Amino acid sequence: MSGEANITNVRKEDKEFIRIVTGLAPDKMALIKGIVIGLQLQDKQLTQAAQTT
């Protein structure tokens, strides 16, 4: 890592989103996690279906 910088630029909108999500109640956080998992599964199924055709 000679001379490399580990820098990530985060937009103002993304920071605000992260603040909101981290402040959610545990039950709402579980709901968000379930939605994300469902979206990932849906994307995975679409990718697999596209590969088989």
Image (tube, rainbow, N blue to C red):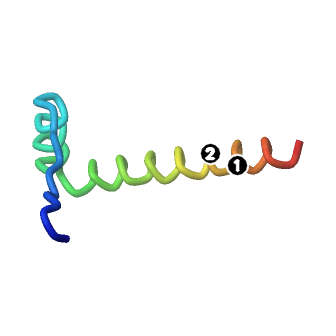
**Residue at the (19%, 45%) spot, across then down:** 21
Label at residue 45: 1
- Left or right: 53 in relation to 23: right
Question: How packed is label 1: few (under 14 Cα within 10 Å), some, or many (20 or more)?
Answer: few
User: Residue 52: x and y, percent?
Assistant: 86, 48
Amino acid on which the number 1 mark rests in the picture? Gln
The numbered mark at residue 12 is none
Q: Are marks 1 and 2 in contact (CB under 8 Å)?
A: yes
Q: Position of residue 29 (x, y in %)?
A: 27, 52
Locate the C terminus by quadrant. top right
Please provide percent x and percent y for residue 41.
60, 52
Total numbered badges shown on the rendered structure: 2
Residue name at image x 33 percent, y 55 percent: 30
- Along the viewing direction, whichever of 23 and 16 lies nearer the viewer: 16
Residue 49 location, quadrant:
top right
Residue 38 appears at what percent x and percent y?
Answer: 53, 49
Q: Is residue 21 left or right of residue 39?
A: left
Label 2, on which residue?
42
For label 2, the SS is helix
